[in-house]
Amino acid sequence: MEKIIWPEGKKFAFTVFDDSDLTSLQNGPLVYDFLYDVGIITTKSVWILQEFEIPIVGGSNCQDRDYLKWVQNIQAKGFEIALHNVSAGSTKRENIIKGLDLFKQYFGQYPKIHCNHVGCKDALYWGDARLSGSRRVIYNLLTQFKKMNRFTGHVKSSPFFWGDHCQKQIQFVRNFVFPEINTLKACPEMPYHDSKKKYVNAWFASSDGGDVDSFVKMIQENNQDRLEEEGGLCIMYTHFGKGFVQNGKLNKRFVYLMERLSLKGGWYVPVSEVLTFLLEKKGLTDLSSKQRSDVESRWLKTKIKAGKTI
């Protein structure tokens, strides 16, 4: 893979996509005040609407006016606001459209970027629909067919369908997450388009850091140094609501590692800004059959090795 020359002579790029899970006014502001202070500007997703059914995992949403005001304040500081489905629970089409319009009203534009939330039936190309061919068969066997045809945000006949609105209004959607600090090394195809998933304009991958323990493990010192040496890109997947704040204080290891990272001369901007830059530098990969097989296989192998098949 050809080495990317990052803007402003920066050595590498680092950013975070923060899923909404468990975020509240008790933990979120502490994390984002810290990130702002160290100059690492990232992407925070939101739920626009109160859930219509009990979610697997919830958190604050933008119908809480104090929470909305806080999210708008961090947007004004440069943080990107993204979508994590319009609510924490499964949502039908008419309410999804309402939620997207409210997103534009609250934040000045439709979301540029989205990722699916766990358990939402309106998730796009999720569960076994993430994969094709023999990889889908293997996935269904490993998950005992529990996620087969479960997510239908991309199925036109489904009451949860909103693929057409995703295609019109959203540029980037997250798919595979890898146990590798250099996301671009794990998925050099990104950003990519998959003709078998027509309602998503461009897919991107992330590096695995879903809670505070896995996050600090991923950005540990030797991984930071390697990311810098490789001139790579890290798009961290996480939930800042999962353990980063305890008893009103930030995790000390997280603080130390992020302060260390911030001094390395990286490019610390929101996710869609990085992805737009990649589009300009290397274009959008239109996946061939072999590339589709390769990226699906790489992801599935990592999940099997880790004993996970989400």
Image (cartoon, grey):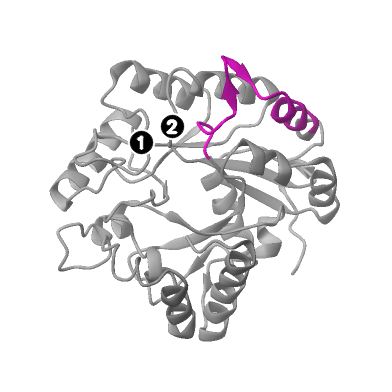
Determine which residue is flagged by label 1: 58
Residue 307 x, y percent position in the rendering: 58, 63
132 sits left or right of 87 in the view: right
Magenta span: 239-260
**Front residue of 307 and 229:** 307
Residue at 71% across, 63% down: 185
Residue 22's label in the rendered image is 2
Examine the rendered structure and indicate whether residue 28 appears above or below residue 126.
Answer: above
Examine the rendered structure and indicate whether residue 294 appears above or below residue 160.
Answer: below
Tell me whether circle 1 and circle 2 mark residues in contact (CB < 8 Å): yes
Q: Residue furthest front?
A: 144
**Front residue of 191 and 83:** 83
Q: Which quadrant of the figure has residue 101?
A: top left
User: Quick one: label 2, few (<14), some, or many (20+) residues within 10 Å?
Assistant: some
Q: Which quadrant of the figure has residue 245?
A: top right
User: Quick one: label 1, few (<14), some, or many (20+) residues within 10 Å?
Assistant: some
| Residue type beneath disc 1 | Gly
297 sits left or right of 123 in the view: right
